[in-house]
């Protein structure tokens, strides 16, 4: 079993409330948490309106599958979130 951690720092310019922040992030828990190989959480900046950090823990049978899932998550997040991805880090455990 191989495990990877994908962390993304997202800028949400002009965000005025926590409710708006939740709407702009577009239900990441629901979207990515359905996959049994992925655990997702808002890992930092929970109370900051104009930024958010999300971490995804991915488990798979090979490092290549972990990388593939991380790439899918990153690509989908960049296309669907109403914000700008500032930083991406990946760590294979």
Image (cartoon, rainbow, N blue to C red):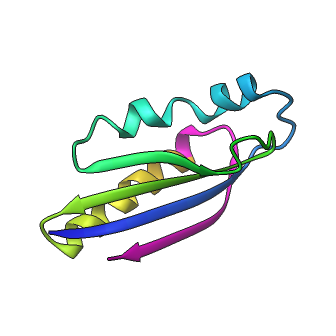
Q: Which residue is drawn at 31% across and 49% down?
A: 38
Left or right: residue 70 compared with residue 35? right
Q: Residue at x 42, y 54 (%)?
A: 56
Above or below: residue 71 compared with residue 49: below
The vertical placement of 33 against 51, above or below, is: above
Which residue does the image show at 64% across and 25% down from the upper left? 23
In screen coordinates, is 72 left or right of 52? left
Residue 51 image position (x, y, % from top left): 75, 48
How many numbered marks does the figure carry? 0
Could you tell me residue 7's position as x and y percent? 52, 62
Is 86 on the left or on the right of 89, as rendered? right
Q: Which of 46 and 82 is in front in this view?
A: 46
Q: What residue do we see at 39% from left, 61% from top?
A: 71
- Image coordinates of residue 39 in percent, x first then y, are 35, 48
Magenta segment: 79-93
Does residue 46 lie above or below 6 as drawn?
A: above
Magenta stretch holds residue 86: yes
Task: Name the image quarter holding the C terminus.
Answer: bottom left
Name the foreground residue: 45 vs 90.
45
The picture places residue 70, in percent across and down from the top left corner, at 37, 61
- In which image quadrant can residue 90 be found? bottom left
Q: Which is the main secondary structure of the residues drawn in magenta?
A: strand
Query: Magenta includes 45?
Result: no
Q: In which quarter of the image is the N terminus?
A: bottom left
């Amino acid at each position: 079993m191989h495990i990877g951690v994908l962390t993304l720092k997202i800028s949400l310019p002009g965000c005025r409330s926590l409710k708006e922040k939740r709407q702009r992030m577009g239900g990441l828990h629901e979207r990515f948490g359905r996959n049994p190989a992925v655990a997702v959480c808002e890992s930092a900046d929970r109370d900051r309106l104009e930024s958010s950090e999300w971490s995804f823990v991915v488990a798979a049978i090979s490092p290549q599958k972990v990388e593939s899932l991380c790439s899918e998550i990153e690509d989908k997040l960049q296309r669907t979130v109403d914000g700008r991805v500032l930083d991406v880090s990946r760590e294979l455990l």
